[in-house]
Image: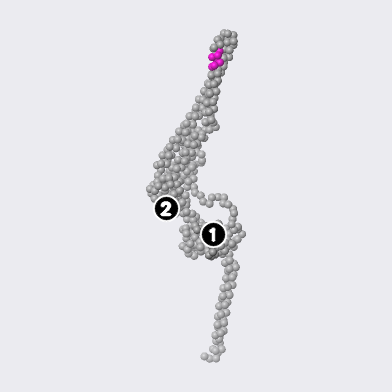
């Protein structure tokens, strides 16, 4: 090695110092970058991986007793709202329905008879009034003759007795008319209490008959089927559940220290373990649980003991998901999720106090049963001489209700 090479080479200490300076610079740059990131982004993000998909489990339970004849869907199958899931034996309810229809028809005819009899009783009152007028006129003609001695006193007494008798008969006829009018006063055939009572019993029998077919209240996937063909079930017996997977949400369990900056309506990014980081869901904070998970546990903790150890508590926060993204990438109940909440917007109330004005969930699967029962009542009243009309406006029938209606006829 010549002298020039020795002069151009850097000493080892100089190279080491340069390397350390570069590493230190990298750490400083990373620290500055993280500080900027934390200032602008990270301090506004609350995240947790203790989050799971939740949803409604719509229980299918009968409203009447009966023996199961058919099951319309099994676990894992998709059903539409209004589709018949379970059919019960209709024999007993059919007999009760026939009896109620006959009772209503009989009540209508009896009330019509009452109203027709009213005219007869009024005519009887008029007849008694005419007889009284006649007997009074006879008495008036006989009185002068009896005073002059031309008419025996006995005949005059007979005339007076006739007037008294016709007066009593007229009063009895009037009392009978008043008593009869109390049965039909200010009523028509269809509004008479007897007809209304029979109509209520018919509605009850019709509803019991129609409810032998159990429809799906919502569209979704069948789960937890326990009913079997031939099983005798009673009102309230759980038969199966329908889970509407298009209405699921996420319950994210945040630590208590993370709740301070969370507000309803804040934007949320979510990642499902089933899809990985390639699929990103978006949602909004919908609300907060009323207490920690331990507060609602089956066996709440007893912290008033000598060996107490503090444990960080978690509160469930409900996240509403975007419906379009959920339709594109379906989720099942219980799946694990990672949640990141953007807390930039903190102006909302921590715990909103505005009450809901519309139903959170509702079904129209049973809506037409009462309509059809009213139409049934009106048809029977009209068929037996009444002038009833359907109480409510007809609605579109679901498939299973139409089937029940055609079977009832």
Residue in the image at 56% along x and 51% along y: 356
Residue 158 lies in the magenta-colored region:
yes
Q: Seen from this angle, which residue lies furthest left?
A: 230
Q: Secondary structure at mark 1?
A: loop
Mark 1 residue crowding within 10 angstroms, few (<14) / some (14–19) / many (20+):
some
Q: Nearer the viewer, mark 2 or mark 1?
A: 1
Q: Seen from this angle, which residue lies furthest bottom?
A: 2
Mark 2 or 1 closer to N-term? 2
Q: Is residue 359 above or below residue 252?
A: above
Give the residue number, with chain letter if any, for mark 2.
225
Q: Is residue 321 above or below residue 377?
A: below
Image location (x, y in percent) of residue 350: 59, 58
Q: Seen from this angle, which residue lies furthest front?
A: 306
Give the magenta part as a residue range.
Answer: 156-162
Marks 2 and 1, how far apart at CA = 32 Å
Q: Are marks 2 and 1 in contact (CB under 8 Å)?
A: no
The answer, for residue 366, to whether it is visible in the render is: yes
Residue in the image at 48% along x and 38% along y: 200
**Image quarter (top left, top right, bottom left or bottom right) of the C terminus:** top left
Image location (x, y in percent) of residue 42: 57, 67
Q: Is residue 112 above or below residue 298?
A: above
């Amino acid at each position: 090695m010549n002298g020039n090479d020795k002069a151009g080479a850097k000493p080892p200490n100089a190279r080491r110092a340069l390397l350390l300076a570069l590493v230190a610079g990298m750490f400083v740059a990373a620290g500055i970058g993280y500080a900027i990131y934390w200032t602008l982004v990270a301090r506004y993000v609350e995240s947790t991986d203790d989050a799971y998909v939740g949803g409604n489990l719509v229980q299918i339970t009968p409203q009447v007793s009966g023996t199961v004849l058919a099951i319309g869907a099994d676990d894992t199958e998709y059903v539409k709202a209004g589709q018949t899931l379970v059919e019960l034996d209709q024999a007993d309810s059919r007999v009760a329905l026939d009896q109620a229809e006959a009772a209503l028809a009989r009540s209508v005819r009896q009330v019509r008879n009452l109203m027709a009899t009213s005219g007869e009783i009024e005519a009887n009152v008029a007849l008694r009034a005419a007889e009284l007028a006649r007997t009074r006129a006879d008495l008036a003609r006989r009185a002068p003759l009896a005073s002059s001695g031309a008419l025996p006193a006995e005949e005059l007494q007979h005339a007076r007795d006739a007037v008294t008798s016709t007066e009593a008969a007229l009063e009895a006829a009037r009392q009978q008319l008043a008593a009869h009018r109390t049965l039909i006063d200010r009523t028509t055939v269809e509004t008479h209490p007897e007809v209304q009572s029979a109509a209520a019993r018919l509605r009850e029998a019709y509803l019991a008959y129609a409810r032998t077919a159990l429809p799906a209240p919502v569209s979704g996937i069948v789960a937890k089927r326990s009913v079997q063909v031939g099983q005798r079930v009673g009102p309230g017996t759980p038969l199966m559940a329908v889970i509407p997977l298009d209405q699921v949400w996420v319950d994210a369990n945040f630590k208590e220290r993370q709740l301070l900056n969370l507000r309803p309506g804040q934007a949320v990014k979510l990642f499902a373990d089933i899809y990985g980081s390639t699929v990103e869901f978006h949602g909004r904070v919908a609300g907060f649980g009323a207490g920690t998970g331990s507060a609602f546990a089956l066996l709440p903790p007893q912290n008033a003991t000598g060996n107490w150890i503090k444990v960080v508590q978690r509160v469930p926060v409900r996240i509403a998901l975007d419906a379009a993204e959920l339709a594109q990438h379906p989720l099942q109940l219980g799946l694990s999720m990672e949640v990141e909440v953007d807390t930039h917007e903190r102006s909302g109330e921590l715990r909103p106090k505005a009450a809901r004005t519309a139903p959170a969930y509702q079904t129209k699967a049973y809506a037409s049963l009462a309509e059809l029962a009213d139409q049934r009542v009106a048809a029977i009243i009209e068929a037996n001489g009444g002038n009833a009309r359907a109480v409510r406006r007809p609605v579109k029938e679901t498939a299973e209700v139409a089937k029940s209606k055609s079977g009832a006829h």
